[in-house]
Image: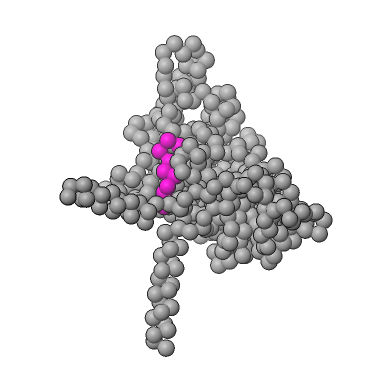
């Protein structure tokens, strides 16, 4: 009896696991295939009408116009994509996908650590490759992302992953790509709930907070230039910043903070620098351009923060920065950021309505993001020798009305577009169709 009860419990657990687990990751590509007839959006600004893309061993081996590209059809599978569009896989910048499953369930959150300076905290080891939120990105063409820890002045180290894997080791594309810091804000708002004036006022502790950060970096640099006789994990984790092996991502929004952060990076001798958020980045775009500092621009669908800013201030920022020559990608942090990451292509679409061309907007979430993260040698555009991480859409992928995927590939693997959301959609669409039939 006891044995039977144990078996029933195991079966119940298996049923629950099968019902709620992510789709099984796709197997490695074993046969060459070609995508024929689609409009190929390369990701670098170019477009090829009626294209042919040949994929072998997970890499793009041929790409060009159908009329001038020879193809041995017998040796491969052919995907007829006439009238459709092919895009590089979209890339989430500054994301937290896989670190939190349910916001209201504390046990499912591994977003941040206690303490102020945590450069040795590695987001990758907390990444949940079987997250149901992660799999819901793929039907919109979001196939890659940066996993970033939050909290503290130095939040920790990010990594780049692909969104179809068994575990974090399989998911990882680039491990420990950079360190993230939250730059002190030069202004703060009064706490209206305590009767304070809700307007902006100078941060009295700004200089002190900047000095603390500067002192920490100086100590880390001194440690890494020394004999390291006594191991110091946080300082040791920062060594890549001083030898150009890692990127420094600085969360800063107001113009003064951004300018000070750029000057801080120069003083520290750090060459790979990106401003994250950058609400007023367009106001100091010349400083960013002169110092070769890129921007992961805050969520496009955001309200203006200052009373004298236009209602469409956030919509127009990308255009202003691109026109200045700043390298820009789009990030999605903020309220409900994990589920909103699937709207990444539509944030890019909004920038088209406010000045950018469609191909420029596409670059914000493909090649530009790959360049900033240092993975553009393999990802971010459809080019010979690069990873076949791409998707086929029935229409414009930057328009939520027409971005309907038929296929998606990560490193040439044909990944599933099924999620718990598509299952529910199919289930209830059948229910209501049956009700309509009965009513007739």
Q: Which residues are magenta?
A: 124-132
Residue at (57, 39) in percent of width and height: 373
Depicted 328 relative to depicted 300: above or below:
above
Residue 422 sits inside the magenta stretch: no
Residue 130 sits inside the magenta stretch: yes
Front one among 294 and 283: 294
Residue 423's spot in the image, x, y percent? 43, 63
Residue 251's spot in the image, x, y percent? 48, 39
Front one among 200 and 136: 136
Q: Is residue 439 left or right of residue 91?
A: left
Depicted 129 relative to depicted 125: above or below:
below
Q: Quadrant of residue 50?
A: bottom right
Q: Quadrant of residue 119?
A: top left
Residue at (22, 50) in percent of width and height: 4
Residue 368's spot in the image, x, y percent? 62, 45
Residue at (61, 65) in percent of width and height: 394
Residue 113's spot in the image, x, y percent? 35, 35
Q: Is residue 308 visible?
A: no
């Amino acid at each position: 009896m006891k044995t039977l009860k144990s078996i029933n419990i195991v079966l119940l657990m298996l049923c629950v696991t099968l019902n709620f687990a992510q789709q099984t990751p796709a197997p490695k590509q074993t046969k060459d295939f070609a995508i024929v007839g689609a409009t190929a959006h390369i990701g670098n600004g170019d477009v090829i009408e009626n294209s042919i893309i040949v994929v072998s061993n997970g890499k793009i081996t041929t790409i060009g116009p159908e009329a001038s590209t020879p193809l041995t059809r017998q040796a491969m599978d052919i995907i007829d994509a006439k009238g459709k569009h092919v895009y590089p896989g979209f890339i989430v910048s500054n994301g937290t996908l896989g670190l939190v499953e349910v916001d209201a369930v504390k046990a499912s959150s591994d977003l941040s650590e206690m303490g102020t300076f945590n450069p040795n905290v590695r987001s990758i080891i907390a990444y949940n490759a079987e997250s149901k939120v992660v799999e819901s990105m793929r039907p919109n063409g979001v196939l890659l992302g940066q996993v970033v820890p939050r909290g503290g002045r130095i939040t920790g180290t990010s990594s780049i992953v692909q969104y179809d894997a068994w575990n974090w080791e399989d998911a990882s594309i680039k491990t420990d790509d950079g360190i993230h810091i939250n730059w002190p804000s030069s202004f703060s708002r009064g706490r209206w709930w305590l009767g304070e004036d809700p307007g902006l006022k100078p941060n009295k502790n700004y200089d002190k907070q900047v000095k603390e950060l500067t002192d920490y970096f100086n100590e880390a640099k001194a440690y890494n230039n020394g004999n390291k006789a006594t191991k110091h994990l946080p300082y040791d984790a920062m060594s890549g910043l001083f030898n150009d092996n890692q990127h420094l991502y600085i969360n800063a929004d107001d113009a003064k903070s951004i300018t000070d952060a750029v000057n801080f990076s120069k003083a520290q001798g750090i060459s790979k620098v990106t401003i994250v958020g950058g609400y007023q980045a367009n106001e100091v775009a010349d400083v960013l351009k002169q110092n070769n500092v890129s921007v992961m621009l805050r969520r496009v669908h955001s309200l203006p923060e200052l009373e004298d800013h236009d209602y469409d201030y956030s919509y127009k920022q990308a255009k202003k920065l691109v026109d200045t020559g700043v390298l820009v990608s789009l990030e999605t942090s903020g309220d409900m950021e994990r589920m909103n990451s699937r709207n990444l292509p539509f944030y890019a679409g909004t920038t088209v309505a406010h000045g950018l061309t469609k191909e420029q907007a596409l670059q914000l979430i493909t090649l530009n993001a790959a360049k900033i993260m240092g993975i553009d040698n393999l990802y971010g555009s459809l080019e010979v020798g690069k990873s076949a991480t791409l998707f086929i859409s029935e229409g414009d992928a930057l328009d939520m009305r027409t971005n309907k995927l038929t296929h998606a590939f990560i490193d040439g693997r044909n990944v599933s577009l099924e999620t718990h959301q598509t299952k529910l959609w199919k289930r209830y669409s059948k229910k209501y169709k049956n009700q309509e039939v009965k009513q007739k």
